[in-house]
Structures are given as C-alpha cells and as structure tokens.
Amino acid sequence: MKYIEEFQDPELARRLLDDIHATVTRPWALMEVCGGQTHTIIRHGIDQLLPDQVELIHGPGCPVCVTPLEVIDKALEIASRPDVIFCSFGDMLRVPGTGRDLFQVRSEGGDVRVVYSPLDALKIARQNPGKEVVFFGIGFETTAPPNAMTVHQARKLGIRNFSLLVSHVRVPPAIEAIMQSPSCRVQGFLAAGHVCSVMGMGEYPGLAARHRVPIVVTGFEPLDILEGVRHAVRQLERGEHTVDNAYARAVRPEGNPAAIAMLEDVFEVTDRAWRGIGVIPDSGWRLSERYREHDAEHRFSVTDITTREPAECRSGEVLQGLIKPNQCEAFGTTCTPRNPLGATMVSSEGACAAYYLYRRLDLTPVRATDPIARTAPLEASPVV
Amino acid sequence: MSETTTLDVTGWTCPAPLRDRPRVVMGHGGGGALSAELVQHLFAPAFGGEVLAQMGDAAAVTLGGARLAFSTDSYVVRPLFFPGGDIGDLAVNGTVNDLAMAGARAAYLSCGFILEEGVEMSVVARVARSMGAAARAAGVEIATGDTKVVETGHGDGIYVNTAGIGLIPDGVDLRAQRVVPGDVVIVSGEIGLHGVAIMSVREGLEFGVDIESDCAALGGLVEAMLAVTSDLHVLRDPTRGGVAAALNEIAAASGTGVVLQEGKVPIPDPVANACAILGLDPLYVANEGKLVAFVPREHADAVLDAMRAHPLGRRAAVIGEAVESHPGLVVARTGLGGTRVVDLPLGEQLPRIC
Amino acid sequence: MCLAVPGRVVEIAEENGTRMATVDFGGVVKEVCLEYLPDLQVGEYAIVHVGFALQRLDEESAKQTLELFAQLGMLQEEFGDPWEQAAEAGGAPWPFEDDESDTVADPAVVGPVDGGHVSREARQ
C-alpha cells in the first residue's frame, strides 16, 4: 500500500462514476472547499466526467489566494528591509500586493527565500544570527501546526531573531459564512481532508444540521474526490444532511490532539479578512500574547499598514457560484492570470483562472442545467 | 464562531491590477511567458533583423554558400556541481543541443567565463576539465574564449557563456512553422530528471533522491533521426519550462493545437514523487538531455525505432499529436479520460503548499 | 490547503531535542518532524505537510475503501453503461476521434502505461 497509485486507478474511478451516474436524478451544486481538491479536479479533468447534474463550485480553500492584500503589503514592507531575510512558501511570491509582489522586492535587493518547511526558515535564523529572519506564516489548519511548532521551538531554544508574519485562516467559519449568505447556491460540501486530519470532525455536525447540508470529509486523490461526490450526492438524493468521513484512512474523529494543543497554546482566534471576500468573523488565527516577541507585525511595527481593497472584481460572488467568472467586467480585461485581481484568478486552479484557460479553448464546462450558463452562454473567443 | 455572520456580496472587493514590471525579475529568465515577452517586446525591436525572428533554439543562417546553425547560451546554475553534472558539461551540452535542434552537428564552440573574485582555482579547473571532456564526447572543439573577473559578491562563483556553430545538412529544415496537423509528437526519454536533480541540492529544498541530471549531448541522436528522413518538422530541447513550454512554443509558432496523452509521457517515479511533494508538474520541469520532435505521421514509426536504437533515446515514446483544433494551445488528455489545458508557464515554477 | 503527501518512516532520531524522522516518498527522502505523532514507528505511513507528519495512515481502512470501490460495479450491471453516456454528455468535446491518438504509431510500439511509465517490454 503506497496510498497514492491505488487511489488513482482508472477502473475503480469508472466504478465510482457509474455509481454516481446511477444515483443522481436532479441538479446538485457541491462545493469542494479546498484548493488542493480543486487542483486534483482540474488536473484529472474530473468535472468533465461527472453527470451534468453535478456542479462543482470551487471554494475559497487556497490559503495563498485568500491572504488579504493588507497582509501582503506588510510582507512587502518587511521583506524590503536590509536587515531581513524573508522566507516564504514558493507560491506566495507571485501574489501581488499593492503595486508589486515578493519577486519585485527581491529584484529590488530584498533577501527573499523560498523554503519547503518553516523549520528551514528557523535553520536559516540560527545560521544568520546577525539578521532578522521572518517566515510568512499563511495557511489553513493543516499548515498552522507546523508554523506553531516552529515559533514554539524558536521560543524554547531562544532564537530571538526569528519571527512569524501570521495570516492563518480557519475553514469552519468560512463554511458558516458561505451558508449564511442569502444567495448561497451550495447544497453540499466536500470538506478538506487534511484540515480534518488535524482538527478532527467535531465542528461539522453542528454546521450540517444548522444549514441542512451534507458535509463529506474528502481526500485528495481522484478516487477520493469521486467518493466524496458519491457520498454527497447520495445524501442529497435521500434528503439527508449528515457528516460522512470519506477519507477514513487519514482522518480520525478527534483529529490530532497534540497538534490541536499546540495550536491552542501558540495562536488565538481572531477575525480575518479573506482576499476578495471580506472579513469573516473568527475565521483566523494570530499569535497569542505569550508569543508576541516572535510576532513580525509587532517587531517591525507594520500594524498600522491598512490597505483597502478597491471594488473592481467579483470573486466573492464567483466563489459562491452566484456568477460565472466571465460575467465579471474585469474578467480577461483588467484581471488575468498575469495581473490577477482576486483570489479566484491568483491561483492557477481558481475558478477564474481555470475559466480563463478554458475560455481560450472554448471547452468551458457550460452545463445545460445551470441557470446562469443558460442566460449567459460563452461565445467562442479567439486566443487571448 | 459568530452566529451573526452575513456576507455582503456587493461589498466583496479585490485589489488593483499589478501593472507591467519596472524591473527584471527571476521569471524573465525562466523560459516561460515572461522570457518570451522580454525577447519579443524589448530585444527584438531593438535589434531588428530577420534571422532573430526565427526564434528557434539556434538561428539558421547562410554564409558563403554554407547553411550554418548559430547559437549562444549562458549558464548561471546553482549549485555549480550537482548530481549527474556540473556547470561545465551543462555549458557545452546546452549549446551543442541548441545547434542539434536545428539539425546541425556542432563544430566549434566559444566560451566566456565570468569568475567571481575569490573563487577557488581548483573549482575553475574542475569546471574546465568537465567542459573539455564534454566537448570531446560531443565531437566539438572549443575554439576561442574569454575570461573576466568581477568583485566578490557580484557573481555566483562562476558564470559560463558558450556560443557555437555547426553545419546544417542539405534538405534539413527544422522550424516550428513546418508543423502541420497530424504530426506525431515524440519525446526522447524520461522527463524531469535534470530539474529534480538540481532542486534536490538547492538551499531550502534539499531532499534525497537517487537520480541524476540527464545532461547529455544530443547531436548523435539527432543524426540517427535524420538518417531515417530529413523531413522532420521541428525539434526542441525542453530545458527551462520543460516539455510544457516547448510544446506551447511550437503550438504558438505553428498555429496548430497540440494534444498530449498524459499517461504516455515517460515520467520516472522519483520525478513524479518529488513533484508531488513540492506541488510541481513534471511537464514543467527542466531537462538537459532530452528532445521533443514533431514528425510527419508516415515517418513516425521508423523515427521512433531509430531513436530507441540510440543510447539516448531508449525510452523514446509517442506522447501526442498536432491537431487542427484549438490552434496555439496544448491540451492534455488525462489518465481518467478528462482533459486539461497545459499552459505556457509564466516564469520559474515554484514549490506550492496548496 | 494543503499539499500533504503520504510517506513511509525509514529512520527515527532525536535532533536538538526534537523527534525527527527520515521519510521515504517513493524514492524521494526528506527529514520530517514527528513531534505531532510521537508514537509513529519505522515502517508506518503518515500524511506529511511542509516537513511535519500530521496523521498516521491506516492501512486497514485504506484496504476497506478500495474493496468497497471494487464492489461498486457489481451493483451497476443492470443500469447499462452510464460511463459511456457520461463520456458523451459530460465530457469535453474532444478534437479528434476517440482513441485515434492511440494509433498514431503502432500501438504495440507505444505500449501500455503503468504508473506513468512507458513499458518498453510491452513491445515484445
């Protein structure tokens, strides 16, 4: 058992698809919450293999994309300082703040480094005692424990030149916010499996019951996605709304208690803005008072940087499945994968970026059952 | 969690667009869209000239009645020494391969060194010996050169530039513009080895993996292919930007679409797994000893056989074809039967966490 | 959120008071922090994200899931072949005739695909 190839098997995928096709009788709109799941769906073309009636709405679960402009501006400011080595996950470098991105800072002389793990940044801090080393701590509940452990270690080992610029986000408040929107079209959720590997499933029964939506904890290989869809469709067809675990090999109901304990020690819950979406109450983590010394926002006095996100794009509506990307005026004009406005264009798998690619191909998965698509069909368009 | 959250959809906003970059960023050297724009919008208008407009790996020029392939490339690889190669054999093989992609056997190379003050002489010697060995193996002579030294901190130890010329055989005309729908796309072997080998020793990413760079000179393999037919349409060595960039460039220049059968692309397990960990796509990872060929359908079998009979083409495989539809775009058919667009990368590929 | 990959523990060691493991991801080896799975043993698989093992993978559960998938088809015989319908209805318009590309050259030369590898042996 390698836990990868086995869950990509085309023959088993066919069986799962057969089952979904045989089960579905009417249109359902499901949201896969996690950007990793969106990646699998696009990478394998899974959306094209599902029945027409099953619409997948790509959720806000790409931590890089939802990092608010204001935090990126803080990162740019800190990374520009000559005494700073700024470390980040690679995909954060190309996300634009106001007027520039971390690549640009690097081209202007900033020491910006890509690392695989926050522990690598801690190592750089030990090797460069004369420099301030800052790690850009973004991510959901999966990435928060590694970042928490790193700052915990820095404090324990007395590595004073290490600090964390934190912009962590939490999934359940985002689901809550999406469901509370009056215009929400989402009827079922594929919950992010690796978030649940850490946090367990305790927060979901309440959500499922309150909003009468099935929530299926779902993994990341193609068969996992199909199994998540199968569970959600089955529940919807039966009028059920419970929490299923379709990723049992990696998710225990209680999650990872050691990681949860560390999160509670290092972080405290806070309101957090999501790029292109706005503030969602209680949807983020910041460093707790105890770790203030390692909080980059305070160390570098950037707490006063506030950036308003000008009203141009409509990625919030796209994320909710309210409009198709091409119904936004900025789509393909002022907003492209090269110059993204909102979260959905920043990520290469974001709904807008994916649409942009498929629009060029005129393969856009327009669905006859989709009322939006019916009223605003895509024209064939030349290569942009 | 707040129970009173209401999303005001009309208030959802996002930031102003990022305009064109006022400074050079790393992506301008990444072999993707940024590199292409730099050449097309800055260099080409400044230089003028018809030959440059060919935009191939090497320029094909006629001089004194002879058809020559002419190419140059600079090497700034870090670290200087990596599993399976170093900056020296890379600098020789890279330019030899650029000439080979025009159908030419490299004859003479020049080399320019930019050395950083303080670099150890033994390191320079090791690189030089490696260049000599690679040149002998490729049957090319390093005929002229130049050395400059820059102050400490102004270079990465050693930068190398090589340029080369070689004769293009009669009847050979390799250009993306010759690609027509129906052409068969062949790759000469397993992809991603060079890029993953380099990444495995790059600071901040280090991982253990039992593979080496595929750095090799492809002149012999190309000769074997041309011996089957001189009517190959285009060859490209998928270096920076990988197979994805090479196919996109050819699709754009030829005005045909390219369809890739994803499951048929030979990807070694360690490459696939390293990419899985880092969130990279093997199609975008650099190679240094591979080529992609667009071959007329009637010659495809014979060319494939000839490639497989050559040591550098043993794992050659048909991976797709040129098509009439979706001109300029590369589309992959996935193992499950879906499709996806394989876009031109913007700049360098970055490890993802998401 | 979260590119996390299954890997197998091959060695465990203390490093600066931190429990670290050498983890094998199918031929790719990385150092991984075990602080969140302190009882993980050599030979076991875990989900690893940015250098941290976050959850143990349960082989029994994985096998059960795959068996369930394998059995699904048995129940569907009576519905005809919805896959074919799906390929037509849900699939993207494909620019050339189905499977034509499999015959661009001699199919035997192309060979079957096994985990991304083109099998040369299949020629014989």
Image: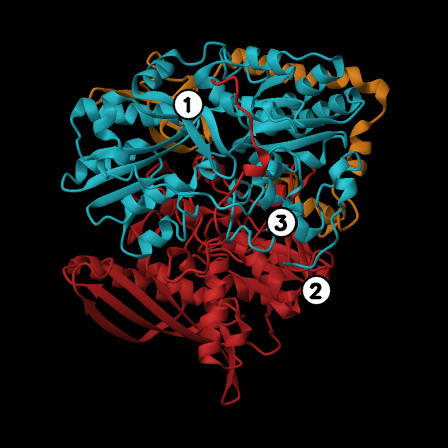
Chain colours: A cyan, B red, C orange
Q: Are the residues under marks 3 and 1 on the same chain?
A: no
Which of the 4 image quarters holds residue A22?
top right
> Residue B88 vs residue B211: left or right?
left
Disc on res. C8 = 1
> Residue C62 vs residue C87: left or right?
left
Picture layout, residue B6 above or below residue B127: above
> Residue B230 vs residue A135: left or right?
right
Q: Nearer the viewer, mark 3 or mark 1?
A: 3
Residue at (47% x, 36% y) in the render? A66
List the residue tagged with mark 3: A357
Q: What element carries label 1?
A: strand
Instruction: Say few, some or many: other residues with alpha carbon within 10 Å of mark 2 (under 14 / 14 to 19 / 20 or more).
Output: many
Residue A14 lies, in percent from the top left, at: 72, 27
Outermost residue, bottom side = B64
Measured Cα–Cα span from mark 2 to mark 3: 23 Å
Taking the image as drawn, is residue B239 in sight? yes
Q: Which corner quadrant holds the C terminus of chain A? A: bottom right
Identify residue type, mark 2. Answer: Val
Instruction: Say few, some or many: other residues with alpha carbon within 10 Å of mark 1 (under 14 / 14 to 19 / 20 or more).
Output: many
Taking the image as drawn, is residue C114 in sight? no
Residue B160 lies, in percent from the top left, at: 30, 65
Which of the 4 image quarters holds residue B121?
bottom left
Identify residue type, mark 1. Answer: Arg
Identify residue type, mark 3. Answer: Leu
List the residue tagged with mark 2: B180
Residue at (67% x, 50% y) in the render? A359
Picture layout, residue A362 above or below residue C70: below
Picture layout, residue B228 above or below residue A199: below
Disc on res. A330 = none
